Amino acid sequence: MRIPLQPVEQLEREQRRRNSEVPELWTTLDRVMDPELPVISIWELGVLQNVELRGQTVVVTITPTYSGCPAMHTIAEDIQAALEQAGYPHREVITQLAPAWTSNWIGPAAQEKLRQYGIAPPQNADSGGVISCPHCGSEQVQAISEFGSTACKALYKCRDCAEPFDYFKSF
Amino acid sequence: MSTDNPVSQYAVRLADDALILGHRLSEWCSRGPFLEEDLALSNVALDYIGRARMFYGYAAELSGDDRSEDDFAFLRDCRDFGNLLIHELPRGDFAFTMARQYLVDVHSVAFMTDLQSSTDATLAAIAGKAVKESNYHLRRSRDWMLRLGGGTEESHRRLQHAVDELWGFTPEMFEMDELEKSLAGQGVAVDVSRLQPAWDTEVRATLAAANMSIPEEDWQVSGGRQGKHTEWLGHLLSDLQFMQRAYPGLEW
């Protein structure tokens, strides 16, 4: 049996949430979904790094997936909207670059949501992960393009069921 | 429009490199040889424009006035741009774009790897994101070198032509001026002169595997870091900066 090792940054992120004095803010932000992958939240994606209350102001720290990801702007707006709706008039969204985002922060539950949505979840080749078709489960798949419809995805095709699919790049 | 802070000046140079190459790559959008390649070129362009924004944003922060990243990108003229010349050359045909990308990618991976250990925490953090993207770009551009070099007679001829045209622009990637020497001495900047031997070995190996001959003609041009550019940069900026020039202060 393989025991999955948590990346240390992921462990720290989960600890910040677990030890937070404002758990209700984290819960509020669980409603903010990635605009391109509407089945997983920014928490599950690893973009949401921290939420704090500094005086009257809610300070949210996020980290970009890819340098040029256009969704980051929408995500910041969605955070503002979710907090406003929850009754927090003073808000600030901070972008933090380090530690650099990695697809390893997407946990097993979120990976399964991606699969059911039709996107093959990221596989770490170093730990023996194999890309499989999200439709039929076959491992007989073929890369069509290293780049897909968004920066975080590549295009694949299944050799068994012949369906094309998006693969969330391991990054 | 310039800035006195040396780290800010350095960040502007790196941002200029990324913006100008990102713009050249974006010119392929809807003109790629096939759909997947169109997406790939646009994706890489986006990575570079994102990189430019991070470096400009930091430069603006350090400059200590009220300028933003947009002021640096849209309101400076040719002589204020400090990008390396190789980035501003017109996109040419697909072979030219991929050959340039390959030569730049090998450099970028080594450069960003080194910049990750900069004593400047923000530059190091930007490099930490950029190095992952450049590694991904390099995988594809190296693959294209082999496919074009070993493809048809035409693809081979076009790639060789591109390599010959680009070769003299590569030595500039390893030049150090006073600003960079001084910053490298403080551990802030990368000493690019030290990256050349490994770059040379790797590029020559790929060119050999792609059946390319190494250009023998001995010429080189430089001047980008000092704002001395080819005629092509002005044309590029007239396109890139048009909206801000025509409608000053325009926002989305």
Image (cartoon, helix red, strand yellow):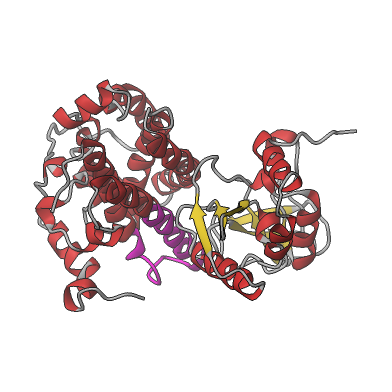
* The one of A89 and A158 positioned closer to us in this rendering: A89
State the residue at coordinates (54%, 42%). A100
Quadrant for the C terminus of chain B in the image: bottom left
Q: Is residue B217 above or below residue B154?
A: above
* The one of B242 and B68 positioned closer to us in this rendering: B68
Q: Is residue A74 left or right of residue B48?
A: right
Quadrant for the N terminus of chain B in the image: bottom left
What secondary structure do most residues of the magenta stretch adopt? helix
Give the residue furthest to the bottom.
B247
* The one of B98 and B154 positioned closer to us in this rendering: B98
Query: Could you tell me residue B195's position as x and y percent?
Result: 32, 25
State the residue at coordinates (46%, 52%). A67
**In this orientation, does residue B153 appear?**
no
Residue B28 lies in the magenta-colored region: yes
State the residue at coordinates (20%, 74%). B248
**What span is colored magenta in the figure?**
B24-50
State the residue at coordinates (72%, 67%). A39
Residue A14 lies in the magenta-colored region: no
Query: Could you tell me residue B95's position as x and y percent?
Result: 34, 53
Q: Is residue B207 above or below residue B25?
A: above
